[in-house]
Image: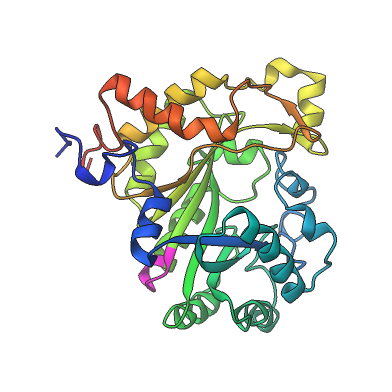
């Protein structure tokens, strides 16, 4: 059945906010602290390919302190917490966010050791583990399910697209069937599962992006991060864009807001939204050059949905 009236849970923003849910659940802000454990990816080390995803330059989102602390996880946590406490003094709980590259890709004992280094920190309540769907063997999922009995554990998959042609175009190294399988296996163990999606990848039409809402709604996802494609220095996509800018059409700010609103209307209403955009540091970003800042995107999205008299899940149909 499709929704006919605005659900109470969505009233404030017109979409289900992960931050609002977490605040209600834990009595205040829960803040992630990025850590880097020195892992890599199977399409970087040669097991599946070389060069990584064509859009990826991890320097675009890694905090500056990670460039100064090496792989010392305790030092990273302490340094990051010192910075973030000044910015978010109301934080109630802290999570270690294994963000860079694929943080379930490695020998099982190596992975366990990295996670334990974060969890022994007295102020850390759990882990957010960013990874790829082709790097989650059952043995590791079983271990994470054990940790989830005591800690907050969130497994964040780089979905990027539900369209196989787009995944192949950006050298992702797996298809959407792989993503579906990984999400289902993780959720079957009771793990909290989130996903990261990029709008505007080459090889994917607007209709295909919107069709992704139904595909993702059919999966046991708890939350999503929604980002626009940016051309980042030091990537293969940047090289392609310099040679032929027209080969990679980029979304304008207004166009992106309209696409987000269309997508959310089709998305299951209980999938929480963690982010609605991204912002690469200007020194690394080649395009697009928006006048809209990241902090403005969420309010503008709500404004767009209000003008439409719309909300997340308005056009979603169960069992569609």
User: x and y percent of residue 83 in the render?
Assistant: 69, 59
User: x and y percent of residue 260 in the render?
Assistant: 43, 30
Q: Residue at image x 29%, y 44%? A: 268
Rendered image coloring scheme:
rainbow
Q: Nearer the viewer, residue 9 or 206?
A: 9
Q: Nearer the viewer, residue 184 or 102?
A: 102
Horizontal side of 225 relative to 239 (left or right) equals left
Q: Nearer the viewer, residue 290 or 50?
A: 290
Q: Residue at image x 64%, y 22%? A: 290
Horizontal side of 152 relative to 2 (left or right) equals right
User: x and y percent of residue 261 in the render?
Assistant: 38, 28
Residue that sits furthest to the top in the current view: 246
Indicate whether 140 appears above or below 221.
below
Indicate whether 190 appears above or below 310.
below
User: x and y percent of residue 215 in the render?
Assistant: 37, 43
User: Is 219 in the magenta?
Assistant: no
Q: Residue at image x 58%, y 65%? A: 129
Quadrant showing the N terminus: top left
Indicate whether 165 appears above or below 158.
above
Please state the extent of the stretch shown in magenta in the rendering.
Answer: 187-192
Quadrant showing the C terminus: top left
Q: Is residue 294 visible?
A: yes
Total numbered circles: 0
Indicate whether 227 appears above or below 66.
above
Q: Residue at image x 62%, y 53%? A: 87
Quadrant in the picture for residue 32 = bottom right
Q: Nearer the viewer, residue 112 or 61?
A: 61
Q: Is residue 130 visible?
A: no
């Amino acid at each position: 059945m499709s929704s006919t009236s605005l659900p109470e849970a969505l009233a404030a923003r017109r979409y289900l906010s992960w931050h609002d849910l977490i605040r209600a659940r834990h009595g205040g802000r829960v803040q992630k602290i990025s850590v880097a454990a020195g892992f890599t990816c199977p399409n970087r080390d040669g097991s599946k390919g070389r060069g990584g995803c064509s859009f990826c330059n991890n320097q675009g989102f890694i905090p500056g302190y990670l460039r100064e602390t090496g792989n010392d996880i305790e030092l990273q946590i302490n340094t990051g917490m010192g910075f973030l406490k000044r910015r978010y003094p109301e934080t109630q709980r802290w999570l270690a966010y294994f963000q860079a590259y694929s943080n379930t890709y490695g020998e099982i004992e190596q992975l366990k050791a990295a996670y334990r280094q974060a969890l022994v920190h007295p102020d850390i309540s759990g882990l957010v583990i960013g990874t790829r769907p082709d790097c989650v063997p059952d043995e590791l999922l079983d271990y994470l399910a054990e940790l989830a009995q005591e800690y907050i554990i969130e497994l964040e998959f780089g979905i990027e697209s539900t369209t196989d042609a787009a995944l192949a175009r950006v050298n992702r190294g797996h298809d959407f069937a792989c993503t579906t399988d990984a999400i289902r296996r993780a959720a079957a163990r009771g793990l909290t599962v989130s996903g990261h999606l990029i709008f505007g990848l080459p090889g994917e039409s607007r209709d295909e992006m919107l069709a992704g809402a139904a595909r993702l709604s059919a999966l046991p996802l708890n939350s999503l991060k929604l980002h626009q494609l940016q051309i980042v220095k030091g990537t293969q996509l940047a090289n392609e864009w310099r040679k032929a800018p027209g080969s990679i059409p980029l979304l304008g700010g207004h166009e992106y807001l309209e696409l987000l609103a269309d997508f959310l209307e089709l998305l299951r209403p209980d999938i929480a939204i963690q982010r609605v955009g991204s912002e690469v540091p200007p020194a690394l970003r080649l395009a697009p050059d928006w006048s809209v800042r990241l902090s403005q995107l969420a309010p503008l999205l709500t404004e767009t949905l209000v003008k439409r008299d719309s909300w997340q899940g308005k056009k979603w149909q169960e069992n569609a």
